[in-house]
Amino acid sequence: MKLLLEKFGRTLISRELGSEALKAFQSTLREIGPDELLEIDFSGVLTLSPSWGDEFLSPLLNQLGDRLVLLASDNLSVQATTNILQEVNKRPFNTKS
Amino acid sequence: MKENLLNIGQAAIILGVSIDTLRRWDENGKLIAIRKEGGTHRYYRENDLEIFSSDLFKFATEWIQNNSDFPGKFYCQTSSVFQAKLTKMEYELMGKPGFEKLYSLIVLVAGEIGDNSFAHNLGKWPDTPGIFLGYDIQKGIIVLADRGLGILETLKQVRPDLPNHTTALEVAFTEFISGRAPEKRGNGLKAVREIVAAQPLDLYFTSGDAEVRMQGTDKSFRVTRGQHILRGCLAKIEF
């Protein structure tokens, strides 16, 4: 399954809205098969902050592990945020270019 | 050429303050009005209002020090107002030559600092809720401030042993704090420090009597003790 993150907004900043986005995504998340990958596509996102990402991507990383796949992005805030979240969670994201 | 003067009502709308505030600013010399010969009504030059509004750092400092009034256009009472103003700023930054890629890191830095203010003071604002967000894209400056609890008091919820503001700021900008609920200052300021260190951005950040300056060619991270104790947090980002 591919998730276009832009569906939650193009400026993803606040911790509160990151948490709301994860709650909204729960029903879709339940439809993912046990071996299915969840690919996160950052196209269209202008700014992604570590606070938003920590509320949305960190729980998904803990739940899905390597089945969570981050598609490559040339956006500098996406790169900075995924780097810091790897440090916070002490585990790397599975990535795909 | 005849100069176009604004009356006090028009000036109040432009600055986003009340007419009473403008009268008070006139009386205490903060923003002196013009009076036509023999008249009592107050008038303002549009250019003077622009110059007055441009000293973002002064407005923010005086607000957190003395709870002084400032132009309403810089006030974000809620997180959603902040988000909307930040998005507007983001579009302006994207259009600035040379910032086509860097804009997202600047928005990230400003967004983390501002969101921290809301996340840590929700339901706990000592007096005025919300934050100051002022920016001038042409000059390359963003100023954020809040009259909240400040870094030391909020971090003490997870680190009760913190002795002073300087140590609190050191922890906030450098340590990953695990199991941080209910304190969700989280790790945003660590990202801010790493980005400012690596990119052509300058940062001044203060809370209590502790100051962080990462400016110019010396981007090494140090927390020093300032001369004054400030309420909440105050940040200046330059680029």
Image (spheres, coloured by chain):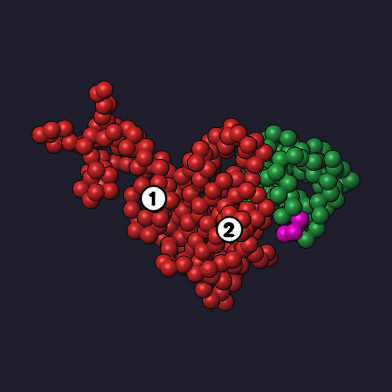
Looking at this view, name the residue that lies furthest to the right.
A35
| Residue B62 seen in render | yes
| Chain of the residue on which disc 1 is drawn | B
Return the residue nearer the eye: B228 or A61: B228
Residue B194 % position (x, y): 67, 56
Q: Residues within 10 Å of mark 2 (few under 14, many from 20)?
A: many
Q: Main secondary structure of the magenta part?
A: helix
What span is colored magenta in the figure? A85-89
Per the image, label 2 sits on a secondary structure element best described as strand
Marker disc for residue B156: none
Cα separation between marks 1 and 2: 22 Å
In the rendered picture, chain B carries what hue?
Answer: red
At 56% from the left edge and 71% from the top edge, which residue is drawn? B167
The green one among the chains is A
| Residue A31 seen in render | no
Marker disc for residue B214: 2
Marker disc for residue B59: 1
Quadrant showing the N terminus of chain B: top left
At 63% from the left edge and 37% from the top edge, which residue is drawn? B98
Residue A86 drawn in magenta: yes
Residue B188 % position (x, y): 63, 55
